[in-house]
Amino acid sequence: MIRYILFDLDETLYPPSSGLMPAIGDRMRAFLEREYALSPEDAYDLQKRYWFEYGTTLRGLMLEHEIDPRHYLDFVHDVDVKQFIVPNPELNRILSSIPYEKVIVTNADVPHAQRVLNQLGIAAQFSRIFDIVFMEYECKPARGAYERVLRALNATGAECILVEDTARNLATARELGIRTILLLQPEARTQPSARFADPAAQMKATACPPDADLCIEDIAQVGDAIAQLAFLPPP
């Protein structure tokens, strides 16, 4: 029986076309340029390598440079979310109709998640935020990240559904018995053009991959998708 819906935050609860994540990506590269005297191109190459090898730029910096994660998180999330996303009353209505406890599971931190949720007008829909600090910086898609969330919820994987926008975060969730919904990113909804492409954007799926139990093309479809998965037998 389903008890919990685990929602990713960034570019799941709002579209990538908002430009918020590219702005945060710019801050990540600025951090690398400033701290390690890198050119913009070298900072991007390092950001990209860390994302692919470790899951996040922060994880790579912690493992290879032992940086203070709070200093990094405060710097990269110093972005005014109101410039990029607007309140979404329809999403609030959809989320309120979902008859299961909803939580956030994000590789960002709690302050950033709170700002995004408050700006969208949906903060009251979520009982908890499980962030990168809670995961002890072992970010999605690491198995340990999901295991920590399940322990905190006192839940099994079969009692949860994950709603994600990044395909590579699904496989380990499914290994734990979590059912998965992937938000596809058709070309019309991809991120705005920028000098450096977000490494995560390369992992967006335009077709439904095997690790997704269901795929949707708009977060407005999430209520129907959850209803469908909740009544299917566990994998």
Image (cartoon, rainbow, N blue to C red):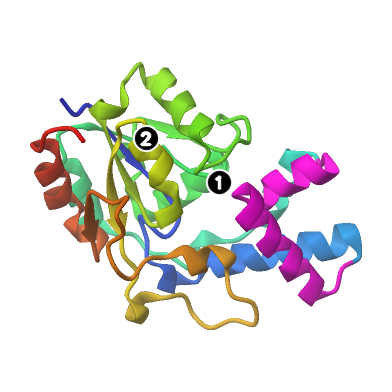
Query: In terms of secondary structure, what is the magenta stretch mainly?
Result: helix
Snapshot quadrant of residue 31: bottom right
Residue at mark 2 to residue at mark 1: CA–CA distance: 23 Å
Image: magenta residue range = 38-67
Single out the residue that lies furthest toward the right. Answer: 37
Image quadrant containing the C terminus: top left
Side (left or right) of 140 relative to 42: left
Secondary structure at badge 2 equals helix
Residue assigned mark 2: 175
Side (left or right) of 199 relative to 38: left
Determine whether label 2 and label 1 are within 8 Å by CB.
Answer: no
Q: Is residue 175 above or below residue 164?
A: above
Side (left or right) of 128 relative to 148: left
Question: Label 1 crowding class (10 Å Cα cut-off): few <14, some 14-19, many 20+?
Answer: many
Q: Is residue 19 above or below residue 156?
A: below
Q: Which mark is residue 108?
A: 1
Q: Residue at x 29, y 59 (%)?
A: 88
Look at the image and tell me whether residue 14 can be seen. Answer: yes
Image quadrant containing the N terminus: top left
Question: Label 2 crowding class (10 Å Cα cut-off): few <14, some 14-19, many 20+?
Answer: few
Q: Which mark is residue 184?
A: none
- Asked if residue 51 is among those painted magenta in the image, a careful observer would answer yes
Type of amino acid under label 1: Ala
Comparing 142 with 221, the one in front is: 142
Q: Where is residue 193? Give x, y as percent.
A: 53, 83
Q: Where is residue 223? Give x, y as percent.
A: 16, 49
Type of amino acid under label 2: Glu
